[in-house]
Amino acid sequence: MNKELIEALNALEKEKDISKDILLEAIENSLITGCKQHFGKSDNIKVKIDRETGDFFVFAEKEVVEEVTDPILEMSLVEAQNISIKHQIGDIVNVEIKSKEFSRIAAQKAKNIILQKIREEEKRSVLNEYSAKEKDIVTGIVQRISGDKISINLGKVDVVLLPKEQVKNEVFTPTERIKLYVVGVSETAKGGVTVKVSRTHPDLVKRLFESEVTEVRDGTVEIKGIAREAGSRTKMAVWSHNQDVDPVGACVGLNGARVNTIVNELRGEKIDIICWSENPAILIENALNPAKVVSVIADDDRKTAQVVVPDYQLSLAIGKEGQNARLAARLTGFKIDIKSESQMKEAEEAKEAEDAIESDELEENINDIESDIVE
């Protein structure tokens, strides 16, 4: 043990955030273990390491007695006074044990314990750091792409972006920096740390807006809900707690600067930002943006809504492969039935015709009954 050890521990503390004092304590304990391996007892063995020089001292605490019955735990007054004339019966004397007395097995055992402690501290450090980032975004560097899995370095740990957490058609290259959502952090059975990350999670969009938009970050503007089909389109409902702050405008930014930054991070994913409302009909109308809506009849108990749009807006309201209507339904929590004005008119005329037939049939039945009574 020397100053090189201290320098190495200082480097470990700086690079891996492992406490030097914890490592020194582990080394002291490991040396005690080494003594136990060599001498068979360790209850009276103590180890001290100089925190500045790295020099270590191993000594046995022995009681000064009149008659020695256990030389490992006791020493005679003569032996004690050879060390210092001041020692008396009953004193505890520290007797230094020279390092050359340690066996190779004991030294190896001590080394293994030190390495184990370093691994434990590395795991603890990584676990603490990334547990604090759970449900948040981190920046990683793409390391390599192996089949359908992408290896990414987050700084202290490498993670794998699994296929189900990848956005379809997103292509990355090694050394590229990307943002990821931390879904969860856990310990593995082998004592490692697993950080699960995602590019498809809806909250990735939420966290990106929090980092980009001051009003969202400070709580002035609240994100009430997000519906996302990763890589294609996101609908986000926002609300302002300050009537002087336009929630949509705050998120879009001057000339779209804020939202465009997020769109670029998401590789061109479209983002519809709408005003949230406590009124379900207004919320549904907003959610179907960019389509124009003629009317909305919402049943809050059944969570269903009947929406009428102009004929020329029907395809826009439904969206390509039903995406606009699907995201609006997911965002609002309502099952939405969309009809054009022509379709609604046809349905109403059909209903009127059906009602008229039922009315005629009812009148005929009444006439038949009256005839039967007269007869």
Image (spheres, grey):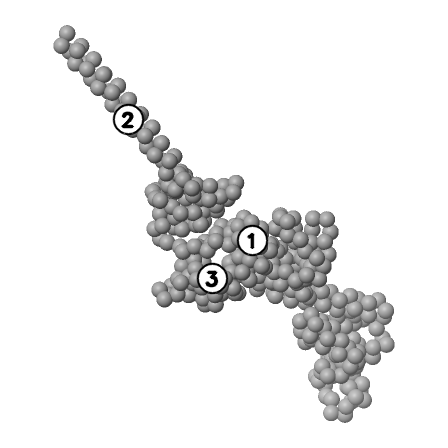
Specify the label residue 347 is tagged with: none
Q: Quadrant of the N terminus?
A: bottom right
- Crowd around label 1: few <14 · some 14–19 · many ≥20 (10 Å): some
Asked which quadrant contains residue 72, the reply is: bottom right
* 166 and 310: which is toward the camera: 310
Q: Residue sitting at 59 percent across and 59 percent down? A: 265
Residue at the far front in the pictured view: 312
The span from disc 3 to disc 2 (Cα, nearest Å) is 50 Å
Seen as rendered, the residue at the extreme top is: 375
Disc nearer the start of the sequence (3/2): 3
* Residue 76 x/y as whole percent: 78, 83
Q: Label 3: few (<14), some or many (≥20) within 10 Å?
A: many
Label 2 sits on residue: 355
Q: Amino acid at mark 2?
A: Asp
Looking at the rendered structure, the kind of residue marked 3 is Cys
Seen at 35% across and 64% down, the residue is 243
Q: Position of residue 73 (x, y in %)?
A: 75, 76
- Residue at point 54% right, 48% down? 229
The kind of secondary structure element at disc 1 is: loop
Query: Residue 11, can we see it?
Result: yes
Q: Which mark is residue 251?
A: 3
Q: Disc 1 versus disc 2: distance between alpha carbons?
A: 48 Å
The residue lying toward the viewer, choosing from 66 and 129, is 129
Quarter of the picture containing the C terminus is top left
**Residue farthest along the bottom direction in this orientation:** 85
